[in-house]
Image (cartoon, grey):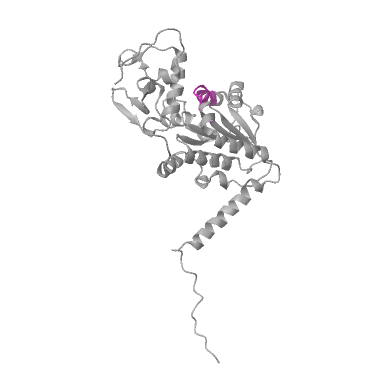
Amino acid sequence: MEKEQRCTGATKLTGEELARYRLRKPGGMEWNARSMTPEELSERRIYMRKTLVRFPRWENMTNAQYEDIRVYRQGKYLMLEDENGYEYLLPAAGVTAEESEFRKIRAMMPFEFLDVRAKDFQWSRYQGDVTVAKEMVNRYILHYEKLRNKGMGLYIYSGTKGSGKTMLACCLLNEITKRYKGVVKFVNILDFLEMTKKGFSGDDEDVNNIRHAGLLVVDDIGVQMSKEWIDTVLYSLVNDRYVNRLPTIYTSNIPVNRLKMDDRITDRIESTTYSVQLPEESIRKAMREQQKQKLLQEIENAPDSAATPSQGNETRQHA
């Protein structure tokens, strides 16, 4: 284990520097521990989340658990020391196909969109101009790693049902899952409210996994009714991700400045997303018809497909 370094003076420490120490608290381990201000704890927590989001074992830890561990570099390696003083060498980055499939299934996205990628979203189906929207989506994928560090997401909207908002969000989620490390989650806003309507609990595992996902898609925000408890739940979700700089992709039928909810919520969404406006056109029916035809062709072309129906071997009797 490395020796504790004394942090003196008024020099502001970075999140990486603070992560080298665990929080000093009564009953806690004193080895490599130090006291921290609320600002330092916040900076440290942001760094820890973004660093450990690539590692399933430590990806969904609570704030209290983060305080008891430390992360530091030893030469070219990244090390983690747990609450008991055991050290772990964190593996290098890189997403395997198995990891990608596992993370995709855990994301809770609609089954019909589990396999869609960015290349599957057919922008040419729109009659209207989609140049700006397409460019924004491509830039987001290309620069995701840097945008993720800033907590920046997207706000995809169109007033027309079936315009492709949810599919586009899933295309992005799958594309990012293939290219980058991290925990991804998809949740419909009404499903999330259903999870919390019996009394919001910050300790609920499913709710916590959604709140702290490395990248989260919140589908159909704005369809919910405006009630005090709903605004409280949504503010808690949006603010938690805002404070921890966790990117979120929202889909909605309403522009962000017209959402009927607490101004604190809309302000945080607007300040942490780039708008992607889709045309006021429905492409859902055409897309689903194409998917059904594709499935039928795959079945017909499969080598183990059933034999073609018999034409019949009836013996004809000639007069």
Work out whether residue 273 can be spotted.
Answer: yes
Q: Residue at x 53, y 56 (%)?
A: 295
Which residue is at the front of the view, 3 or 53?
3
Work out whether residue 223 can be spotted.
Answer: no
Residue reaching furthest to the bottom:
319
Residue reaching furthest to the top:
9
- The stretch of residues the image draws in magenta is 232-247
Q: Main secondary structure of the magenta part?
A: helix
Q: Position of residue 252 (x, y in %)?
A: 61, 35
Indicate whether 188 appears above or below 150: below
Magenta stretch: residue 245 in it? yes
**Image-quadrant location for residue 9:** top left
Q: Position of residue 20 (x, y in %)?
A: 37, 19
Q: Is residue 256 left or right of residue 65?
A: right
Which residue is at the front of the view, 161 or 199?
161
Indicate whether 72 appears above or below 104: above
Q: Is residue 305 left or right of residue 266?
A: left
Q: Residue at x 51, y 43 (%)?
A: 110
**Image-quadrant location for residue 82:** top left
Residue reaching furthest to the front:
75
Magenta stretch: residue 239 in it? yes
